Image (cartoon, rainbow, N blue to C red):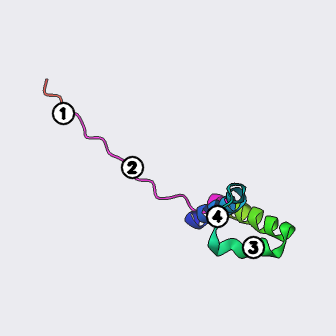
Amino acid sequence: MRKIGIYAALIGLALIILPYFGLTLRLFGMIDELGQTPAWAIKIGLVVVGGVLFFMGKPDEETELELPEENSAE
């Protein structure tokens, strides 16, 4: 779920930021045709839902590193 959350939040942020540079994501270009208010609601919703999915998801498995024991020959 964390990966889906990251992807949704990144797409939402890209949809918000890219039009300021004259760019858009071709796949999500139809969102802007719905009107200004619904488009902003969808973009902000993607960021919020992505954040929720990221923080509600299970953390990745932590791998414990075992340090080699130092054998001192004194």
Depth check, mark 2 against mark 1: the one in front is 2
Disc nearer the start of the sequence (4/3): 4
Frontmost of labels 3 and 1 is 3
The percent position of residue 46, horizontal first and vertical second, equals 71, 65
- Looking at marks 4 and 1 on the same chain, the residue that comes earlier in the sequence is marked by 4
Question: To which residue does mark 3 refer?
Answer: 31
Which is more foreground, mark 4 or mark 3? 3
The answer to whether 63 appears left or right of 59 in the picture is left
Give the percent coordinates (x, y) of residue 31. Answer: 75, 73
Residue 17 x, y percent position in the rendering: 69, 56
Kindly identify which numbered label has been placed on residue 64: 2
For the residues carrying marks 2 and 3, which lies nearer the camera in this image?
3
Evaluate if marks 3 and 1 touch, with contact meaning CB atoms under 8 Å apart: no
Identify which amino acid the numbered label 4 is placed on.
Ile
Whichever of labels 3 and 1 marks the residue nearer the N terminus, that label is: 3
Numbered label tally: 4
Which portion, as a residue range, is magenta? 51-70
Determine whether the residue tagged by mark 3 lies in a helix, strand or loop: helix
Q: Amino acid at mark 3?
A: Ile
The label nearer to you, 4 versus 1, is: 4
- Quarter of the picture containing the N terminus is bottom right
Secondary structure beneath label 2:
loop
Q: CA distance from mark 4 to mark 2?
A: 33 Å
On the image, numbered disc 4 is attached to which residue? 11
Q: CA distance from mark 4 to mark 1?
A: 52 Å
Examine the structure image and report whether residue 68 is included in the region drawn in magenta: yes
Looking at this view, name the residue that lies furthest to the top. Answer: 74
Gap between marks 3 and 1, in whole Å?
64 Å
Write down the quadrant of residue 70 in the picture. Answer: top left
Q: Amino acid at mark 1?
A: Asn
> Identity of the amino acid at label 2?
Glu
